[in-house]
Amino acid sequence: MTDGGVPAADMWPVLDRAPRQPLPLSVRARALFLTGRLDEAREAYAQLRPMLPLPTANPS
């Protein structure tokens, strides 16, 4: 991030090359969302969602 809270331009190529694992995908989806790139954020989240574990029981 730059001092103004805007992602640095060199961040996007790094996120594009990141492994397709839950943590990097969630960081990428959040960065896209925070910069107003909502369609791309939805696409990134759609890739992430099948990787997330589903709870097997209600924890409460």
Image (spheres, grey):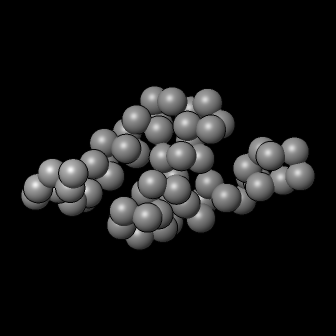
Q: Residue at x 61, y 30 (%)?
A: 36
- Residue 24: x and y in percent read 47, 63
**In the depicted structure, whether residue 35 falls above or below residue 30:** above
Could you tell me if residue 50 is visible in this image?
A: no
Of residues 52 and 19, the one drawn nearer to the viewer in this rendering? 52
Q: Residue at x 48, y 46 (%)?
A: 29
**In the depicted structure, whether residue 54 falls above or below residue 21:** above
- Give the residue furthest to the bottom: 19
- Residue 22: x and y in percent read 36, 62
Could you tell me if residue 6 is visible in this image?
A: yes
- Residue 58: x and y in percent read 15, 51
Q: Quadrant of residue 42?
A: top left
Q: Residue at x 80, y 46 (%)?
A: 5
Q: Residue at x 47, y 37 (%)?
A: 40
**In the depicted structure, whether residue 47 falls above or below residue 14:** above
- Work out which quarter of the rendered image holds the N terminus and state it: bottom right
- Give the residue furthest to the right: 3
Of residues 12 and 45, the one drawn nearer to the viewer in this rendering? 45
- 59 sits left or right of 24 in the view: left
